[in-house]
Image (cartoon, helix red, strand yellow):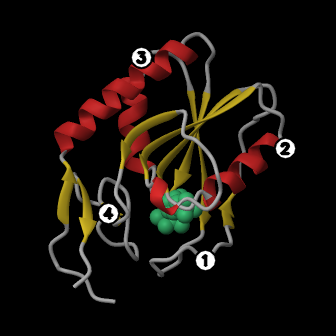
């Protein structure tokens, strides 16, 4: 399927900065003094994670995990492929998973099961964007930036077929 060349803006970089700031205040209330381990889900979360941790003014640790369920398709395959697992110790730690976008929920529910097996002290989810219209696995986001419509979202780390991650705003692709 083809797309318009120009992605349409949905949330500006200023709106994103305000949302990240608000999230950092909420996260600080819960995690200050607990030295949480923030686990970013690659690749999509890399820009959000970088901005979020620089808004958090207390000691924390950072880890990344990489999974893929979309490949080059616009539709989730329904199967999650683990590309890079965890190396940091999770048992007994306060874990905050940092996702770019929750769509069907298949990726994050797979990751929550994977991390739960390692017996963390607590486990919560922070997502930049949530697209509840497409949910297949029921789950809620503990710390959420934006609810987005049922459109293909790109920018600020989020791709379509590895493209558009560099866009500073959150945008959507309109079908032609
Ligand atoms: C995207 C996104 C989430 C997942 C959400 O990842 O980053 O991890 O899909 O979709 P779901 O809720 O339907 O599972 P993708 O597989 O495209 O990999 P990427 O992070 O490398 O872009």
Q: Earlier in the sequence, mark 2 or mark 4?
A: 2
Q: Can residue 157 be seen at all in this image of the molecule? A: yes
Q: Mark 1 points at which residue?
A: 77
Residue positioned most to the front:
133
CA–CA distance in space, label 4 to label 1:
19 Å
What SS does tag 3 mark?
A: loop
Q: Which of marks 2 and 3 is nearer the N terminus?
A: 3
- Cβ(mark 4) to ligand 1 < 8 Å? no
Asked whether the beta carbons under mark 4 and mark 1 sit within 8 Å of each other, the answer is no
Q: Name the residue under label 3.
A: 57
**Identity of the residue drawn at 68% across and 53% down:** 109
**Identity of the residue drawn at 37% across and 66% down:** 159
CA–CA distance in space, label 4 to label 3:
29 Å
Answer left or right for 112 relative to 126: right
The x and y percentages for residue 53 are 43, 30
Q: Which of marks 3 and 1 is nearer the N terminus?
A: 3
Q: Name the residue under label 4.
A: 154
Answer left or right for 15 relative to 144: left
Quarter assignment of residue 160: bottom left
Asked whether the beta carbons under mark 3 and mark 1 sit within 8 Å of each other, the answer is no
**Identity of the residue drawn at 33% across and 72% down:** 163
What SS does tag 1 mark?
A: loop
What SS does tag 2 mark?
A: loop
Asked whether the beta carbons under mark 2 and mark 3 sit within 8 Å of each other, the answer is no
């Amino acid at each position: 399927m083809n797309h318009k060349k120009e992605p349409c803006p949905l949330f500006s970089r200023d709106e994103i900065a305000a949302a990240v700031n608000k999230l950092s205040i909420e996260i600080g209330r819960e995690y200050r003094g607990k030295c949480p381990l923030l686990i970013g889900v690659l690749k999509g979360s890399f820009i959000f994670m970088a901005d979020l941790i620089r808004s958090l003014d207390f000691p924390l640790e950072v880890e990344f995990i990489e999974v893929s369920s979309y490949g080059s398709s616009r539709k989730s395959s329904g199967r999650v492929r683990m590309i890079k697992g965890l190396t940091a110790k999770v048992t007994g730690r306060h874990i905050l998973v940092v996702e770019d976008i929750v769509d069907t929920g298949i990726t994050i529910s797979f990751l929550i099961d994977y991390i739960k097996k390692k017996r963390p002290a607590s486990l919560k989810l922070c997502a930049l964007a949530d697209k509840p219209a497409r949910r297949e696995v029921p789950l809620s986001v503990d710390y959420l930036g934006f609810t987005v419509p049922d459109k293909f979202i790109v920018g600020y780390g989020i791709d379509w077929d590895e493209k558009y991650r560099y866009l500073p705003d959150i945008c959507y692709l309109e079908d032609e």
